Amino acid sequence: MSDYVPTIDDIRVKMCYICREEENADEPSDPPRTWTHPCKCTLIAHEACLLSWIETAQAKPTGRDAMKCPQCGTQYEIVHNRGQFGFGQRIAWRMLTDVNIIVGYLGKMVLILVPSTILSVVGAGAYWMLTRYGAYAIREFFGQEIYDTFLTDDMTKWPWSAYINLPLIPIFLVASRFDTKFGFLPIISALLEWPNLYDREPQIPMPMPPNLTNIFPPSPYTVGFILLPIARFLYDRALKRLTKWVLGARVPTVDGEDENALMVVRVRGGANDGEPQNANQENQQDDNQPADQPGVEEPVAEHNPAEQTITIYASPLGRKLAGALLVPMIARHMGNTLLRLARKQGVLARYLRSILAISPRSAPNRSWWDANSLSSTSSSSWKAGSGSASPSLSFGVGNYRWGVDNNGSTFFGSNVPWKDVWRALWGGSKAWAEFDPVWWRNTIGFGLFVVAKDALNLLHLWLIKRERETRRIKNRDFAGVDITGLDLIERTTS
Amino acid sequence: MSSISSRRLSKELMEIKNDGCPVGINLVQADDFSTWLFTLEVMGESLYKNEQFTLQFRFDEQYPISSPAVQFVVTDGRQAPIHPHVYSNGHICASILGNEWSPVLSVIAVCVTLQSMLASCKKKQRPVDNDRYVKHAPENPKKTRFHYDDDTV
C-alpha cells in the first residue's frame, strides 16, 4: 500500500478552518455537507464556507486575494459541474462578463475624453485669438500692403510658419513687459515670418541694374538685430543718468514685496534695489527701448531712514497687459502722425521725409529713391545666376539662403557674390524695398512715444518729490483746549 | 438556525476558556456574540512596559467571513497606546483588520498580532495625520479606508 494517497474523506476528524466546526468520520452530519481540500497544506473547509468566503472577498475591490490559501498560498481552482452549468451557459457567462469589463473601460475613457475635449476646444479658441492678434499686430506695424501681400486675411493662404509665429507675438509682447530680457522676442517672432517672403516674390521679373543698392531704410533685420539693441542700450544709459540727476535716485523699480505698486522709487538713497524691472516700459520693435541693464543683482539694501520711498499704486498688472497689447496700435498711430507731418511743405517736412523714407506719392511700391533703381539686386542676380525656377522652400535673407529648389536638390547660396549678400542683409531685399516702409516710421514713431512717456514719468516723479519735500504740517494754537493740565512756562508780565 | 458567527464565536470562547489566553492578554467580557473586551499588555522590555490597554472587538453576522471591528477603548480614563499606527481615538491601522483579513485568523490571533505590533515599536509617536483623521473619523473603524504603510514600524 505504498502508493496509497489519502483524500479528504479519509480524515477522521475534520475541522473547517472557516467555521471551526468539527465533523467526526463516525458521525457524518445530517444532511451531509461537502468537504474540500483545495490546497497543498492541511487546511480543509466546508465547500459552502469556502465558496461563501470567496464570494464575499471578491465583491470588495480591495480585499485580499481570496483565491489563495491563507497558509500555503496555493491558488484555488474553481470548476463547474457540466450538468449544472452547461457549455452554452458558460460561453454566455464568459461573454457577458467580458463585455461588462470592456464597457467599464470605455466608461473610464469617456471620463477622460470629455474634459480633455473641452480643454482642447478652449485651447483652440485661445490659439485662434492669439493668432488673430498676431496678424493684427503685423498689419498695424508693417502696414496694410505688406500685410495683404504676405499674409492676407485669409488664414488658408498663410505660410506654415505663420501659424507658429503669429500666436507667439502677443505672448512675447506681454512677456517682455514682465521681464525685459524678453524684449527682443516679439521682433524675432515677427521677423521669422519674412523668409517666406521669397516664396511670394512678385512674379514680375524686374531687370535690375546691378550696382544700385539702397541702404536706407535699413532692412527690418538690420533694425531688429543690430540697431535696436544698440539704441536700447544707449537710451537706457541716458535715461538712468537723467533720472539720477533729476531725482537723485536710481532707476525706478518694482519692489518685490510690494506687488500692488506700480513703481517704487528710492530717492536720495542710492542703494541698489535688487533686479531692476521697469514697470512702465513698452517694448516691441522700437529703437528707443529703455531696457534694463542685465542685472546688477545685489541684495536689497537695508531700509535707510534717510531715504524716501515713493510708492505709486496704480493697478500695474492690467496696465502692463494693456500696454503690451496696445503696442502695435500705438506704433501705427505714431507712424501715421509722422506721415502726416512729413507730407506738409516746408524744410522740416522735407527733412522728416528723408528720415522716414517717404515717397512723394502716398501709394506704396515706390520709395523715395528713383523708381528704376529699386534696391538690392541680390535676389535677381541670384536668380540670373542660378537660372532655375524659384525654389519651393527656402530660408534666409537675400542671397544667403538655404533651401530646396523645385527639382528637389538642395542649394546653398553657391553662386552668389558676397557683396550682394551684404547689400541684401543691410538693405533688405527687393521685395522689402517695393513697399512703403511703414514699419520704419512706425518704429521711429513708437520710439518717440516711449521717450515722451518716460519724460512724463520722470516729470511726475520729480513733482512728487517736490511735493514731499515742501510738506509742512499746519500749526494750531491751544484755543479751546483745557489748559489746566498743561505745564506752561511762566510768562513775565510785561 | 444560529448564524455562522455565533457558532464560530462560541467555539472560540470555549477554546479560550479551556486553553486560556496567551501571556499579557486577558478576556474581560464576552457576554454576547456582538462585543468582546480584552486587556492587552506588552511583555518584556518594550516602550509600553507596565501599560495596560483595553481592546474591543465587535462582530457582525458574517464573522469570520467579514472581519471584526477592533479598536482600543478610550473611554473612562483609558488611553490608546501611542503608536504610529494607532490613532488617539483608538482606531488601528492594521492590514489584518482590513484587506489582509482571512477566516483562518481568530480573535486570539488578532490580539497576539497587535501585541507584537506594539512590542516592535521603535518610537512612541502618533500617526502623522492623527488630528485630521480623528476629526472626521467614522464611528466604526471598518468604514475607514486605511492605507497600509510600512510594517517595519
Image (cartoon, helix red, strand yellow):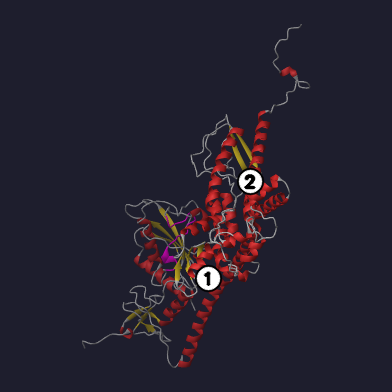
Magenta-drawn stretch, dominant element (helix, strand or loop): loop
Comparing B40 with A149, the one in front is A149
Q: Give residue B140's mark.
A: none
A9, above or below B134, in the image: below
Is residue A415 something one can see in this rendering? Answer: yes
| Label 2 element class | helix
Residue at 74 percent across and 17 percent down: it is A484
Mark 2 crowd level (few <14, some 14–19, many ≥20, 10 Å Cα): many
Residue A3 image offset from top left, x and y in percent: 23, 87
Residue at 32 percent across and 52 percent down: it is B45
Which residue, given by chain and number where applicable, does mark 1 sit on? A390
Residue A432 colored in magenta in the image: no
Q: Quadrant of residue A127?
A: bottom right
Magenta stretch in the rendered image: B84-99
- The residue marked by circle 1 belongs to what chain? A
Residue A431 image offset from top left, x and y in percent: 59, 62
Residue A454 image offset from top left, x and y in percent: 63, 42
Amino acid type of the residue tagged 1 in the rendering: Ser
Q: Residue furthest right?
A: A480
Which residue, given by chain and number where applicable, does mark 2 sit on? A450
Residue A175 image offset from top left, x and y in percent: 57, 53
Mark 1 crowd level (few <14, some 14–19, many ≥20, 10 Å Cα): some
| Label 1 element class | loop
Q: CA distance from mark 1 to mark 2?
A: 42 Å
Comparing A222 with B103, the one in front is A222
Q: Count the labels in the image.
A: 2
Location of the C terminus of chain B (image quadrant): bottom left
